[in-house]
Amino acid sequence: MNNHLLKYLSTVPVVATIWVTFTAGLIIEINRFFPDVLYFYL
């Protein structure tokens, strides 16, 4: 099998897991400091 394909398949799940964990942590921290806020006015 192609070496680049194996590198792609082994890298994408790691990056996706880190990204989802970061996003979930960010949402949790926003809700901890600003409870009951449905959206922010920019």
Image (cartoon, rainbow, N blue to C red):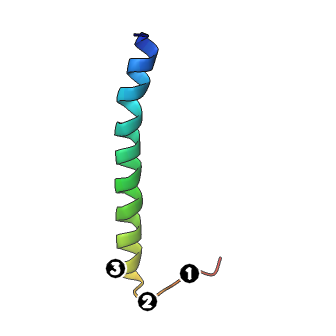
Quadrant of image for the C terminus = bottom right
The Cα atoms of the two marked residues, 3 and 1, are separated by 14 Å
- Report which residue position mark 3 lands on: 32
Look at 45% across and 15% down and name the residue there.
4
Vertical relation: 1 (above or below) 37: above
- Report which residue position mark 2 lands on: 36
Vertical relation: 10 (above or below) 24: above
x, y percentage for residue 22? 38, 55
Look at 43% across and 89% down and name the residue there.
36
Q: Which residue lies furthest to the right in this view?
A: 42
Which amino acid type is shown beneath numbered disc 1?
A: Tyr
Q: Residue 39 carries which label?
A: 1
Look at 34% across and 79% down and name the residue there.
32
Quadrant of image for the N terminus = top left
Q: What element carries label 1?
A: loop
Q: Which quadrant of the figure has residue 16? A: top left
The Cα atoms of the two marked residues, 3 and 2, are separated by 9 Å
x, y percentage for residue 6? 38, 19
Vertical relation: 30 (above or below) 24: below
Q: Which badge, 3 or 1, is on the more N-terminal residue?
A: 3
Q: What element carries label 2?
A: loop
Q: Mark 3 or mark 1, which is nearer to you?
A: 1
Residues under numbered marks 3 and 2 in contact, where contact means CB atoms less than 8 Å apart: no
